[in-house]
Amino acid sequence: MIKRPNVNSIKSNNLPSEKYFSRFIASQLQLIQFNNKYYSDKKWGNFKAPYVEALKLQEDDMLDENKLAPKLSSLILSQVEGAKRLGVCC
């Protein structure tokens, strides 16, 4: 018997259903918009830097839902596919 790697031991080794991804992306977009509105310039810069780098976005595109959502969705789905290849189930 092949033992699956223990990737997410706190909750389980199961991925969430793909039906939740669109809501997750929508909540990420809301978080970004909220933080842009209420964070200081310095704090906003620190917050957005990992997004800009990971999603390969121009800084101005962080607030453009039509550019941010597809990049975020693509990144998440590629991570899900990688997890599936490691044996994590849905």
Image (cartoon, helix red, strand yellow):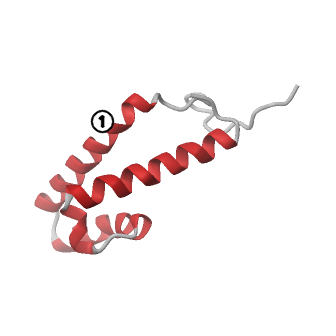
19 lies left or right of 83: left
Q: For the N terminus, which image quadrant?
A: top right
Within 10 Å of the Cα at label 1, are there few (<14), some (14-19), or many (20+) other Cα atoms? few
Residue 9: quadrant of the picture: top right
Q: Position of residue 84 (x, y in %)?
A: 63, 39
The answer to whether 65 is drawn above or below residue 80 in the figure is: below
Q: Amino acid at mark 1?
A: Arg
Q: Residue at x 40, y 70 (%)?
A: 56
Residue 71: quadrant of the picture: bottom left
- Mark 1, secondary structure of its residue: helix
The answer to whether 30 is drawn above or below residue 23 in the figure is: below
Q: Residue at x 52, y 50 (%)?
A: 78
Q: Residue at x 54, y 32 (%)?
A: 15
60 lies left or right of 87: left
Q: Position of residue 3 (x, y in %)?
A: 81, 31
Q: Residue at x 31, y 70 (%)?
A: 46
Q: Position of residue 25 (x, y in %)?
A: 32, 44
42 lies left or right of 70: left
The answer to whether 30 is drawn above or below residue 19 in the figure is: below
Q: Pointer 1: what residue?
A: 23
Q: Nearer the viewer, residue 85 or 42?
A: 85
Can you name the residue that lies furthest to the top here? 1
